[in-house]
Structures are given as structure tokens and as C-alpha cells.
Amino acid sequence: MDSNFKVLLAPDAVDNGGEGSGNFGHSGRPGEQGGSGDGGGGKEKKEKSSGIKEKVTKALEKSEAEYQTAKEDFGNASREWGAFQRETRGKPLMKWSKEDFERKNLIGSKRSRAEKKMRDADNKRYKLEIASGSSEAVARSVLKDMNID
């Protein structure tokens, strides 16, 4: 087709590319139909994906620290529980004082809470490890599911 005829039919198609040219921020190919010119497109996606991966990495580091703290708390509570059991070994329940029962309940509750925190932190860490090795869409979904901004 004669280029003068193109100008008469669609003057801006010569400068901006023909119908169907350009997409997702690309400029199109001047004087051509289909395809895209330089620029646009991929930069926005790369910035988003690196932001998602950075959030996952940061959340993973935080969850690892939470897990280590919970693990330490559980270890301390378990040692305290063991000491209590050694102290009361062989002592019939009928001879336990009110303080013995309160201490047993306090230590037992502390140990149970620490164990739950450790399990929760380990589960969170596991999900984030999966997200860190997965696609951007999976990582975004995991972060959303865990209410991580």
C-alpha cells in the first residue's frame, strides 16, 4: 500500500504504529501493524516481583526469629516442667499443697503456650519457604493469606 494513502486513512497510525500496535505501555512500531516499539511493558512487572520477593524474604527472616524465640521458650518451660516433676516425684497428690497444684497448672500452661507458638511459627516459616521458591502469583497469594503487607 502506498505510504501517502496510509496517511490519508489514519494519519496517527504512521507516527504511532498501525491498528494493533503497541500494548502494555509500548509505543508501537511506526508505519507497521502489529508488534511493539521499544520501552514499556516489562519494567513494571520486574519491580513488582522484586518487591514481592523482598517482602517474602523479610517475612521469612522475621518468622525464623519468632520460631527460634518460641523454641527457646519451649525448651525453658520444658526444663521447668521437668524440675517440677522431679520435685514432686513420689509425693502423693493428697499431700500436694495448693501452691503445688497452682505451680503445676502455671508451668503446664506456660509449656503448652510455648509449644503452640513454636508450632505456629514453624508453620508460618514453612509457608514462606514455599513462597520464596515459587512464582510471584503464589508468593503474593501466600502473603495475602497470612495478612502480610
Image (spheres, helix red, strand yellow):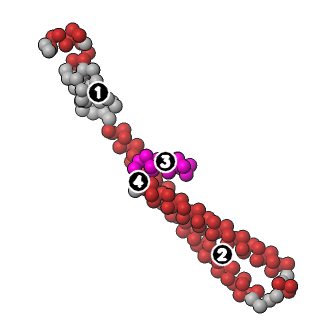
Question: Disc 1 vs disc 2: Cβ atoms closer than 8 Å?
Answer: no
Q: Mark 4 sits on what residue?
A: 134
Circle 2: is it few (<14), some (14-19), or many (20+) Cα within 10 Å? many
* Mark 1 in CB contact with mark 3 (< 8 angstroms): no
The kind of residue tagged 2 is Ala
Label 3 neighbour load within 10 Å: few <14, some 14-19, many 20+: few
Q: Residue at x 54, y 49 (%)?
A: 145
| Magenta highlight: main SS | helix
Q: Are marks 3 and 2 in contact (CB under 8 Å)?
A: no
Q: Is residue 77 above or below residue 67?
A: below
Residue at mark 2: 77
Q: Position of residue 13 (x, y in %)?
A: 24, 17
Q: CA distance from mark 4 to mark 1?
A: 30 Å
The residue type indicated by label 3 comes to Ser
Indicate left or right for 138 with 89 as reference.
left
Are there few (<14), some (14-19), or many (20+) residues within 10 Å of tag 4? few
- Which callout, 1 or 3, points at the residue further toward the start of the chain? 1
Q: Point out the tag, 4 or 3, that comes first from the N-terminus.
A: 4
Q: Image point 42% across, 56% down: which residue? A: 132
